[in-house]
Image (cartoon, grey):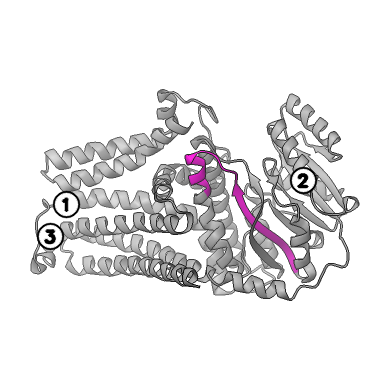
Amino acid sequence: MAYNQNKFSVRLITVVLFIVLAIAGLVFSVYLFIIANSIYMYLIAAAFLVLSAVSGFFNIFAAYWYYKAYFYPSYLKSIKSGLKPMTGFPTVAIAVPIFNEEPKVVAKTFAKLAELNYPAEKIKYYMLDDSNKAEIAKEMRKIARKNGATYLHRDNRRGYKAGALNDMLKISKEEFVAVFDADEYLTNRNFLLETLPYFQNENLSYVQTEKKAAKGNFFSDSVDLFNAFFFKFIQTARALNNTAIFAGSCGIIRRSALDKMGGIPEYVIEDTFFSFESDENAFKSLYIPKVYALGRPIKTFTALSKQQWRYNYGDTQFLGYFLKRIKKGKKIKKFTALSSVDYIAHGFGLNYLSLILIVFTFISVLIVFSAFPLKYLTLSEFLNVKNVTMDLEIFGIIAFTLSLFIPVVLTKFYFKSVSKGVMIFLLNFALAFVRTRAAIAAMLNGDPKPQWQKSLAKKISVSSALYNTRFEITFASILFVLGYISMFVNSNLFGGLWLMWYGALYAIATVFFYRYG
């Protein structure tokens, strides 16, 4: 009981920090407009206002998600208490989409899936192989034959993962479809027995369970915590609004719901689009915060960058898709304000994390080059327009400290690690340009595949690391030069150190690429 009270107290303190940070930014923006006395200062004030408004929206909504997630276990318990014992065993298709995967990894996945605690005659396994390498496809066919799985191979990747699933739906007749990624191995044999009872609600279209990676190195474990925030806090809060995201695997879907929706939308991140279509068709969904399978850990920075590129490309596509659908009014269900905000926040989430950092860095440059040297300020001096740049620098440091403090506190309290909280903070800077470039590519209908000179290598050379992070290292170099000018030409030591610190944060992408591959 004492632990739960302590847990709730930490949650409330964190919520207050989110809200204080949001309000402080808006109040300070208003203050800047009041004391501005030049076009230059009005531009800074306007930029701060936009930044504070966007940041404030996400901070307050993050606080809402985080607070609301606390009550999800009680909600799920009430649903579970109303379930009746299963009286029959519906048929289930187990689908495993594949694209040039390691044969031994896929073999392990199918071997573990064969251990499902469920009548064997009620399960049919499908290997959906999009591999374009003949030797891999040959091995996959052998693995499918050995495990009694139906092997489906495509010569093109139309619709990516969604296209493969839709092609499977043309021949499968099972009542439910469970999806697992090629690198996810089952850890709980009761997956079907524990998820299928929830479908007693005939309007339930899918059940999503918690996704988690197996233990790896410090980097991969930090990345897993990076994703855990979504599954621990955002998914649970969204599930209360019926907007939990089907995460693409470790979940099960009612076949009749798929038929009504015309299959799975064929986009880069088909899961988000499918979740929205399910909600739009007035279906219910459910999230179970329990791990049934473990995925392969992301051990390289290249693999993480590719994942984040795909996520941000797809989320940007989804944001435009959602806004167009709402604008046209072609919807079956009337979305509530909260559910609409859920979808907008999801579509803009990674863009926000990236743009907020980059825009704040640009504003920091403007501030530093209107700066006065750091000195002790009395209250009257603090309110004097001549010292406005000093005020901005002080506020920037406070905001920066809080943005670092929150993830560190959460990872320490929930995951018992300060170092991984710091790593999560650094990863947001390291991935800022990758995400931004992906968003731009999506808006321009560019190639959804990221391009790197060398991918997934065990050892990266310095030249390769520099080339693959050329955007980040160029931006960091500019910040270092501007910091030097500020310190030794304008005699603004504090401002120069501020810019150099930001330069180091963006340059961390090169370090990660070289260190982790």
Instruction: Determine crowd level at label 2: few under 14, some 14-19, many 20+ residues with C-alpha closer than 10 A.
Output: many
Instruction: Determine crowd level at label 1: few under 14, some 14-19, many 20+ residues with C-alpha closer than 10 A.
Output: some
Residue 228 at x, y percent in the picture: 53, 54
Q: Which mark is residue 370?
A: 1
Q: Secondary structure at mark 3?
A: helix
The relative height of residue 339 versus residue 406 in the rendered view (above or below) is: below
Q: Nearer the viewer, mark 2 or mark 3?
A: 2
The kind of residue on which mark 2 rests is Leu
* Distance between the alpha carbons at the discs numbered 2 and 1: 63 Å
Marks 2,1: beta carbons within 8 A: no
The kind of residue on which mark 1 rests is Ser
Residue 337 at x, y percent in the picture: 54, 73
Query: In the image, 206: left or right of 169?
Result: left
At a point 78% along the width and 66% down the height, the residue shown is: 197
Quarter of the rendering containing residue 145:
top right
Query: Does the image show residue 387?
Result: yes
* Distance between the alpha carbons at the discs numbered 1 and 3: 10 Å
Query: Does the image show residue 261?
Result: no
Q: Which mark is residue 232?
A: none
Instruction: Determine crowd level at label 3: few under 14, some 14-19, many 20+ residues with C-alpha closer than 10 A.
Output: some
Query: In the image, 433: left or right of 393?
Result: right
Marks 2,3: beta carbons within 8 A: no
Q: Which mark is residue 113?
A: 2
Q: What is the residue that sits farthest to the right in this orientation?
A: 121
Query: In the image, 114: left or right of 47?
Result: right
Magenta residues, start to end: 204-224
At a point 77% along the width and 40% down the height, the residue shown is: 111
Which is nearer the eye, 161 or 504? 504
Quarter of the rendering containing residue 99:
top right
* Distance between the alpha carbons at the discs numbered 2 and 3: 66 Å
Residue topped by disc 3 = 387
Q: Secondary structure at mark 1?
A: loop
